[in-house]
Amino acid sequence: MATIRLQREDFDVAAEQRKLSEGRGDIGAVVTFTGICRGGEGAEDIAAMTLEHYPGMAEEEIARHVTEAEQRWALKGVTVIHRYGRMVPGDNIVLVLTASSHRGDAFAAAEFLMDYLKTSAPFWKQEERTGAAAEKTSWVEARDTDQAATDRWNKPNRGRTAAE
């Protein structure tokens, strides 16, 4: 069972984990990843970030990758919550929870989902920067390192379940 939500408002990590695992004797591990808006990026700090998305398409793309994770690993539950709108440093951006009987599946699935969220989910990020030399707002371009992290999941023997 998967939960996927795109929302403006913040989320409560502990409450979401409880929703996923409460009363479930078959879950032995829950991996929690929370992406947080950071402020320091070197000489020019980030004052805020605005995330935009393509409604409908974003949920479908995330669901497609959740389904793939469920096929690759023995998962008992998945939650993906991604915020959109304007955020400032310290604000939560994304939550990925993966639950399984064994930690290996939960860790691998969470990492897989985050790699794909960074490269494939239809979100656009605009940063507002501080400092005299900085262009005040700019759209963030994709990074080769993010794509390389995603590409590694297509190599043989990536994504085997704990039972294999």
Image: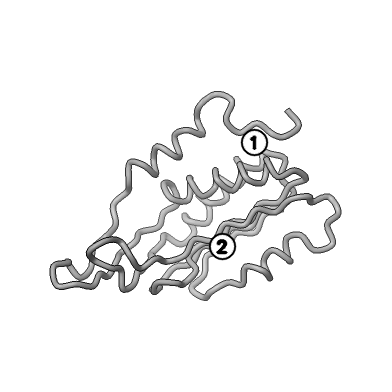
Amino acid at circle 2: Ile
Residue type pointed to by label 1: Arg
Instruction: Determine which residue is flagged by label 2.
Output: 81
Q: Residue at x 34, y 61 (%)?
A: 125
Nearer-the-camera pick, 8 or 26: 26
Residue ranking furthest to the front: 42
Judge left or right: residue 61 versus residue 102: left
Name which residue lies at 63% across and 58% down: 79
Q: Count numbered badges in the picture.
A: 2
Q: Residue at x 54, y 47 (%)?
A: 113
Which residue appears farthest toward the top when viewing the image? 156
- The extreme left residue here reads 133
Residue 53: where, in percent of width, then height?
41, 61
Q: Position of residue 93 (x, y in %)?
A: 48, 65
Mark 1 falls on what kind of element? Answer: helix
Q: Which residue is mark 1?
A: 72
**Does label 2 or label 1 sit earlier along the sequence?**
1
- Residue 46 position (above or below residue 68): below
Q: Residues within 10 Å of mark 2 (few under 14, many from 20)?
A: many
